[in-house]
Amino acid sequence: DAGVIQSPRHEVTEMGQEVTLRCKPISGHDYLFWYRQTMMRGLELLIYFNNNVPIDDSGMPEDRFSAKMPNASFSTLKIQPSEPRDSAVYFCASSLRGLETQYFGPGTRLLVL
Amino acid sequence: SQQGEEDPQALSIQEGENATMNCSYKTSINNLQWYRQNSGRGLVHLILIRSNEREKHSGRLRVTLDTSKKSSSLLITASRAADTASYFCATDGGQAGTALIFGKGTTLSVSS
């Protein structure tokens, strides 16, 4: 299995632009998680899905952030408009059972200028 | 919200020495997990210990869990330079449907 795939790996954009991050979970996994990692705040859970349905989005910082999972093999995290404070590494992870082993993608390093 | 807190924040040792990292959490759990993150990479699952287990081994890793103290420790024996990474504990909320909460990690540096 190729593992969790994320794209792009790096993204540099200017404040105000729309940013879309993509994730392909491991085939057969029914949970998908989006995290954000910064030095100051550590690893924060943004949102997670079970069987393509959003279960908990309480970690989404504000309305500028949205996430979708149109099917079992694809999810997006969108930031519109982006701000410099959104600069972070965004990770996608998937699991077969929600509270057990999670498999992380390589992350997308986002820099908003 | 409950959260695993690792201690120490940073640890520097020589190759061959043992490394011990601790994790404390606040609420009851179903399981506790340890993950490793190499620089610039995603997290990798190391080991899961359930609330009814007290100790678990995997290769050079030994994890203990004390639910009465709400704490866990990760021991890496005979460390190698390749063990240099950040180590995170993650706890669930003890309830179905809650997600894992990760601590801020211990950064381990192993020098040769």
Image (cartoon, rainbow, N blue to C red):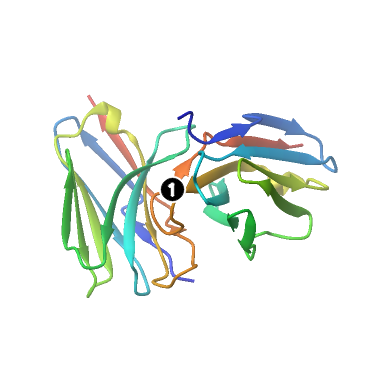
Q: Is residue B54 left or right of residue B89?
A: left
Residue placed at 33% from the left, 67% from the top?
A: B30
Which quadrant, please, contains the N terminus of chain A?
Answer: top left
> What residue lies at 64% left-to-right and 58% top-to-bottom?
A53
Number of numbered labels in the structure image: 1
Instruction: Provide the residue designation for mark 1.
Output: A102
Q: Amino acid at mark 1?
A: Gln
Which of B86/A40 is in front? B86
Whole-percent x, y for residue B49 in the image: 26, 57
In the rendered image, residue B100, in percent from the top left (x then y), is placed at 45, 60
Using the rendered view, name the quadrant where residue A61 is placed. bottom right
Q: Position of residue B83 (x, y in %)?
A: 28, 33
Displayed quadrant of residue B103: bottom left
Q: Nearer the viewer, residue B93 or B68?
A: B93
For the question of whether residue A41 can be seen, the reply is no
In this orientation, does residue B3 appear?
Answer: yes
**Which residue is found at the position 31% from the left and 59% from the top?**
B23
| Chain that bears disc 1 | A
The C terminus of chain A - image quarter:
top right
Residue lying farthest top?
A: B112
**Which residue is drawn at the image coordinates 44% and 50% (left, top)?**
A96
Q: Quadrant of residue A14?
A: top right
Rendered location of residue A8, percent (x, y): 66, 30
Relative placement, left or right, of A14 versus B36 is right
> In the displayed structure, would residue A55 be above or below residue A4?
below
In the shown orientation, is residue B7 left or right of residue A48?
A: left
Which is more toward the observer, A107 or B16?
A: A107
Please tell me whether residue B69 is drawn above or below residue A34 in the rendered image: below
- The crowd level at tag 1 (other Cα within 10 Å; few <14, some 14-19, many 20+) is many
Residue at disc 1, secondary structure: loop
